[in-house]
Image (cartoon, rainbow, N blue to C red):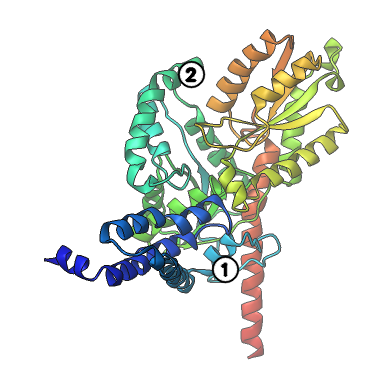
């Protein structure tokens, strides 16, 4: 009966559907950067269906301009609907506006009194080879990190398929570094070192813990721990020094999501970045010098320095992600302290899948340097604060083997900064900055009360 009614009023049916179909498409389009591929896709997504309807309903070709006009009306309605529901943060991100660099620090309550938990943030890793597949499923299931058409619908299937295909090779690689990732142990040691440093500074009413996205302790576990402690504030402190929505942004997103379900009363504090902190920079300088033995006649100037960072899907960069620019700033500070004017480069590693990632890739740089006659190469894992699969296996084993086969006879890698005193100092300074701001805010409040 309903189909018959549609056929009895073909022009009305086509008109209504042209508008209605395009409302959600216009809503989705407004989430995409203007003139991007996705933006154009959602504008034209309804065309095949409208063409099919026109043929099936037998409407005249003369009605095509009206169909296009009505589709545009639907897109406009959807676009305005999205504009009304868009938050300030979403609008800023879409328009690549970043006001965080010089934004004044704001806290919901000046009466902090040091009652907060510092949560170190990282992605995590499988503790043993038996955990590899579960870790990969969690990783590949993250639609915030890995995006493709209909990802929200197909992501679970994609994650299980990809983890199955990669499981054997991944286990073999983890086995090369002892079976499983050392990242849990390393992060726990960093948390303990930071806690000790804070207590030495007199900041005693503060807990230090950590949270991983894809392995225990997951955000839910960490929030449960914070809730039991009774702390009212969380200071999220990323172990990804260079900000990206894929890393720090994702960590904070899932930690806040868990807090909303488990401990909605807890408040999150902002934290300053430390990718240009003197202690953090000095940690890299020291790790580089540790690879050279002057007593044996070695000179750092004889080595080409290749700073290797974890790559990033290109769509993050198109959305205004600041990650590669902060990497460049850190490297600039390191080479300045080293007094190095040339014979250094930045490259990116660990890209996965057919998507476009930030380049140049580290393996391609090694091949290019070998062709140019470089015989001594020192790779600095600039975006990593712990040694794990990307450093101990990918760089120190796989890239080493590749480099030696290409004729680079002296291949070295500086160790990750781990618990270097300068790095722990940088983290502690971030925390102390919050405490200093709290004390300043408290004094201001008390002064205003006296005046009143």
Q: State whether residue 229 is above or below residue 24.
A: above
Q: Quadrant of residue 98?
A: bottom right
Is 301 placed above or below 202 here?
A: above
Residue, disc 1: 107
The picture places residue 414, in percent across and down from the top left corner, at 69, 25
Residue at (53% x, 25% y) in the render: 389
User: Which mark is first along the chain, 2 or 1?
Assistant: 1
Depth check: 419 or 216 in front? 216
Residue 340 x, y percent position in the rendering: 86, 31
Residue 112 visible to an observer of this rendering: no
Element marked by disc 2: helix
The quarter of the displayed image where residue 368 is located = top right
Task: In the rendered view, tell whether residue 429 sits above or below residue 72.
Answer: above
Residue at (56% x, 50% y) in the render: 237
Which residue in the protein does label 2 denote?
173
Residue extending furthest bottom?
452
- Which quadrant is home to the N terminus? bottom left
Query: Is label 1 in a helix, a strand or a loop?
Result: loop
Is residue 425 at least partly visible in the picture? yes
Left or right? Give the position of 276 relative to 32. Answer: right
The spot of residue 398 in percent (x, y) is 59, 17
Along the viewing direction, whichever of 164 and 237 lies nearer the viewer: 164
Which quadrant is home to the C terminus? bottom right
Q: Residue at x 57, y 68 (%)?
A: 107
Given contact means CB atoms under 8 Å apart, are the residues at marks 1 and 2 in contact? no
């Amino acid at each position: 009966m309903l189909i018959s009614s549609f056929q009895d009023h073909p022009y009305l049916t086509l008109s209504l559907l042209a508008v209605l179909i395009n409302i959600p498409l216009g809503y989705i389009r407004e989430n995409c950067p203007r003139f991007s591929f996705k933006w154009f896709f959602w504008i034209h997504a309804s065309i095949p269906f409208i063409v099919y309807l026109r043929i099936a309903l037998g409407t005249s070709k003369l009605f095509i301009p009206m169909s296009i006009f009505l589709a545009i009306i639907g897109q406009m309605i959807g676009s305005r609907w999205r504009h009304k529901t868009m938050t300030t943060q979403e609008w800023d991100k879409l328009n690549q506006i970043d006001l965080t660099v010089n934004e004044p620090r704001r806290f919901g309550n000046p009466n902090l009194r040091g009652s907060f938990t510092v949560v170190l943030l990282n992605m995590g890793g499988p503790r043993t080879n038996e955990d590899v597949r579960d870790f990969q499923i969690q990783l590949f299931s993250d639609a915030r990190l890995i995006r493709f058409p209909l990802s929200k619908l197909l992501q679970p299937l994609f994650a299980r398929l990809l983890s199955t295909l990669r499981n054997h090779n991944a286990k073999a690689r983890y086995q090369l570094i002892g079976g499983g990732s050392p990242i849990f142990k390393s992060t726990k040691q960093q948390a303990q070192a930071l806690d000790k440093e804070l207590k030495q500074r007199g900041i005693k009413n503060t807990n230090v813990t950590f949270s991983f996205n894809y392995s225990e302790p997951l955000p839910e576990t960490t929030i449960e721990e914070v809730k039991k402690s009774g702390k009212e504030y969380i200071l999220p402190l990323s172990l990804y020094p260079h900000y990206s929505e894929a890393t720090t942004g994702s960590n904070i997103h899932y930690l806040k999501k868990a807090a909303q379900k488990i401990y909605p009363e807890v408040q999150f504090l902002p934290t300053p970045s430390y990718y240009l902190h003197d202690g953090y920079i000095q940690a890299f300088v020291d790790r580089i010098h540790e690879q050279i033995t002057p007593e044996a006649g070695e000179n750092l100037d004889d080595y080409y320095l290749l700073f290797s960072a974890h790559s990033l899907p290109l769509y993050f960069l198109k959305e205004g992600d600041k990650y590669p620019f902060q990497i460049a700033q850190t490297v600039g500070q390191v080479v300045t302290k080293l007094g190095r004017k040339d014979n250094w480069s930045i490259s990116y590693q660990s890209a996965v899948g057919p998507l476009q990632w930030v380049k140049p890739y580290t393996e391609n740089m090694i091949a290019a340097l070998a062709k140019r006659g470089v015989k001594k190469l020192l790779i600095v894992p600039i975006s990593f604060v712990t040694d794990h699969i990307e450093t101990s296996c990918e760089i120190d084993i796989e890239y080493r083997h590749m480099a030696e086969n290409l004729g680079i006879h002296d291949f070295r890698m500086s160790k990750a900064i781990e618990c270097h005193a300068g790095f722990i100092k940088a983290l502690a300074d971030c925390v102390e900055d919050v405490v200093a701001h709290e004390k300043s805010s408290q004094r201001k409040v008390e002064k205003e009360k006296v005046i009143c």
